[in-house]
Image (spheres, rainbow, N blue to C red):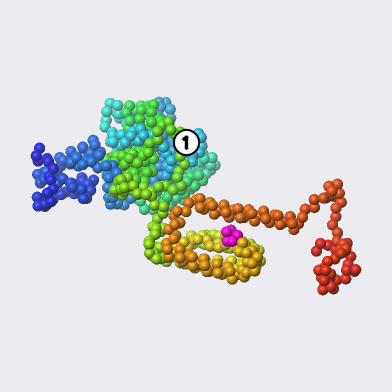
């Protein structure tokens, strides 16, 4: 109809000046971008606001994709808009620890939730019969399980910003959202609730069972005492800011667990979890009495410390539940892994905290799917686990509007380095920029170092700087016959080290003599000795010329060429030094043979009767005779046989 057509903006605002937008209308259009030409609303539509809001809500439930009058936003655009919204105290993203628990309920058998995997940043699985954790590895997911997860979010229950104090409250909220049907009657509802409240068995509990009965009774007594104490208090919740509860949890002590309840393995793992982290629990399993799947995604506000739910005592923020009929345990496991892996993704993690409705979560999954790389089935072995990278690539481009489009459409050659190694084209231009970059942080480098935490670093750097100076100083003394020894090396390293640390950009650089310097000094001293030159004078000239060349290199921004130095260049220099040192060692061995010759004509049969004695020389040399005369030694009065080696 004509009154439902979009109004074309002709550049005038006189026809819409008097329109007053309600707060609900503005919030309903939260996915619009500033600067995009958008259709305006006629005055006559304002009377049908309530009906249109319900209609739009139904449309969003059916089709989560954000559309406005035919304009379709990509998942990346919607995610970038979600992440650009203002944060409040309850929706500030925290570090997440994700745990996957599974259950299999069959008639006549007792079952409990068992922990099968966990994620801090990378996946770790329980293996070898539940005795130990695997090494962290990059999770590999099937594309089908990701699409199944997307379908679960679209068709399942989504509860955002729910206030609950216990697992019982959460179970009642989830079951309260399920529509009654012949297949999901009150009896089935009660069974599902019983399953959700079953005990959680964690991998580290086997180690706890080895504790002495006295310790176990002590822990049980403290737990009962704390439960009685908690009856008079409201539900324990943790705000995003650090609190005494989180501080106690970091030390392995919570009001609900005794001090002896955490094993050494748990305490070691707790140190890896960042302060203020929250938990995301993924619960999947097959129930033989269910005829249709039950799916729920819950975000608690604020996070709640659920007793026994998580392996480590940290508050739970997210809960994903997938319970279905029997026979599909592997499928449920893969969907649970997909949910846990997406929660560790930096972008979807932030979307989960800031999502306003189901559509935002689906947009986050779609954006995650846009970034997924698919490996063909026959060209790699799925059983091989991918090692975590040393440096995780930044995901900031996914958060900035237009960054991905620019990088794909305008592919620029990748730079070798940052702005520090770019040519300025001006005399001493690089030095001026270095000073400007360093000046704002100059005093803070020294102020931040005035802390007890830095004392260990001071001692380590002192030893690290002194050891090579003294070691190579002693070797220099031998190589230069005392012209440059340990004292000169120590004085020079102290003076240059202080000056370099005050004015250079890297105050932690270790300065002093090294292997190449030692080799250079030996060659230079040998050269001076052969040509009868003054070693120290020549060494001073070399130092002055080196300083001059350094000034020229700084003035011409020659340091920008460092970015082109590859590992081949480094290895070539290292190989040269190694060859020189090996040659020096072999040369010393050859001189040793000349100084201490080996007696090649000894008879093995007479080896045990060989002896050593002193006797007067038959034909003393002139030098020996002069020594005797100068020292007044009477050779005839010496009993040579009684002399020792000394």
Q: Is residue 490 left or right of residue 287?
A: right
Magenta span: predominant SS is helix
Assign a secondary structure to mark 1.
loop
Magenta-span inclusion, residue 516: yes
The answer to which of 131 and 421 lies nearer the viewer is 421
Indicate the quadrant containing the N terminus: top left, top right, bottom left or bottom right.
Answer: top left
Q: Is residue 547 above or below residue 80?
A: below
State the image coordinates of residue 29 (x, y, percent, origin top left).
Answer: 20, 46
The image shows residue 572 at horizontal and vertical percentages of 54, 52
Q: Position of residue 363 (x, y in %)?
A: 29, 41
* Residue lying furthest right: 636
Of all residues, the one furthest to the front in this rendering is 531
- Give the camera-side residue of 439 and 338: 439
Name the quadrant containing residue 327: top left
Residue at 16% over, 40% down: 52
Which segment did they paint magenta? 515-520
Q: Look at 38% across and 36% down and name the residue there.
A: 374
Q: Which residue is mark 1?
A: 384
Counting from the top left corner in percent of width and height, residue 63 is at: 24, 36
Q: Is residue 24 part of the magenta span, yes or no?
A: no
**Of residues 282 and 395, the one drawn nearer to the viewer in this rendering:** 395
Horizontal relation, residue 249 to residue 61: left or right: right
């Amino acid at each position: 109809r004509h009154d439902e057509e979009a109004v074309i903006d002709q550049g005038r605002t006189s026809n819409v000046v008097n329109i007053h937008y309600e707060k609900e209308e503005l919030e309903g259009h939260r996915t619009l971008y500033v600067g995009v030409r958008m259709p305006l609303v006629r005055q006559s539509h304002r009377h049908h606001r309530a009906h249109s809001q319900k209609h739009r809500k139904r449309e969003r439930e059916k089709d989560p994709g954000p559309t406005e009058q035919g304009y379709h936003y990509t998942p990346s655009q919607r995610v970038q808009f979600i992440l650009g919204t203002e944060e409040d105290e309850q929706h500030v993203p925290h570090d997440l620890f994700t745990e996957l628990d599974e259950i299999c309920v069959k008639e006549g058998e007792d079952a409990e939730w068992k922990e099968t995997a966990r994620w801090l940043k990378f996946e770790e699985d329980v293996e070898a019969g539940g005795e130990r954790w695997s090494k962290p590895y990059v999770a590999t997911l099937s594309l089908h399980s990701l699409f199944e997860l997307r379908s679960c979010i679209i068709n399942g229950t989504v509860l955002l910003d729910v206030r609950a104090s216990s697992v019982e409250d959460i179970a009642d909220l989830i079951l309260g959202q399920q529509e009654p049907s012949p297949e999901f009657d009150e009896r089935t509802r009660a069974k599902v609730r019983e399953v959700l409240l079953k005990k959680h068995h964690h991998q580290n509990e086997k180690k706890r069972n080895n504790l002495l009965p006295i310790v176990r009774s002590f822990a049980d007594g403290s737990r009962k005492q704390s439960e009685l104490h908690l009856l008079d208090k409201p539900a324990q919740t943790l705000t995003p800011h650090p609190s005494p509860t989180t501080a106690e949890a970091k030390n392995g002590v919570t009001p609900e667990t005794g001090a002896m309840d955490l094993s050494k393995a748990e305490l070691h793992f707790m140190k890896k979890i960042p302060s203020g982290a929250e938990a995301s629990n993924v619960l999947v399993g097959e129930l033989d009495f269910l005829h249709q799947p039950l799916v729920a995604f819950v975000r608690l506000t604020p996070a709640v410390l659920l007793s026994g739910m998580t392996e480590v005592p940290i508050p739970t923020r997210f809960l994903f539940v997938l319970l279905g009929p029997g026979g599909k345990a592997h499928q449920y496991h893969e969907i649970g892994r997909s949910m846990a892996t997406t929660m560790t993704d930096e972008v979807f993690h932030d979307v989960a905290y800031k999502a306003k409705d189901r559509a935002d979560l689906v947009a986050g999954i779609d954006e995650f799917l846009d970034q997924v790389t698919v490996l063909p089935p026959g060209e790699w072995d799925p059983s091989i686990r991918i090692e975590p990278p040393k440096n995780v690539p930044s995901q900031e481009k996914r958060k900035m509007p237009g960054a991905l489009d620019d990088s794909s459409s305008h592919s620029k050659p990748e730079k070798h380095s940052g702005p520090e190694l770019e040519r300025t084209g001006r005399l001493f231009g690089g030095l001026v920029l270095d000073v400007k970059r360093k000046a704002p942080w100059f005093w803070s480098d020294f102020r931040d170092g005035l802390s007890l935490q830095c004392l260990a670093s001071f001692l380590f750097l002192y030893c690290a700087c002194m050891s090579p100076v003294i070691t190579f100083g002693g070797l220099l003394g031998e190589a230069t016959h005392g012209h440059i020894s340990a004292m000169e090396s120590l004085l020079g390293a102290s003076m240059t080290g202080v000056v370099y640390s005050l004015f250079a950009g890297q105050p932690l650089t270790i300065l002093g003599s090294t292997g190449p310097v030692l080799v250079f000094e030996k060659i230079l001293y040998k050269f001076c000795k052969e040509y009868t030159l003054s070693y120290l004078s020549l060494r001073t000239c070399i130092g002055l010329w080196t300083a001059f060349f350094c000034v020229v290199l700084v003035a011409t921004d020659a340091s920008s060429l460092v970015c082109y130095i590859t590992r081949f260049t480094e290895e070539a220099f290292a190989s040269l030094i190694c060859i020189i040192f090996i040659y020096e060692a072999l040369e010393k061995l050859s001189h040793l043979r000349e100084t201490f010759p080996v007696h090649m004509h000894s008879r093995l049969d007479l080896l045990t009767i060989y002896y050593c004695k002193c006797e007067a020389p038959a034909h003393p040399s002139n030098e020996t005779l002069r020594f005797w005369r100068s020292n007044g030694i009477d050779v005839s009065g010496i009993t040579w046989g009684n002399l020792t080696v000394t």
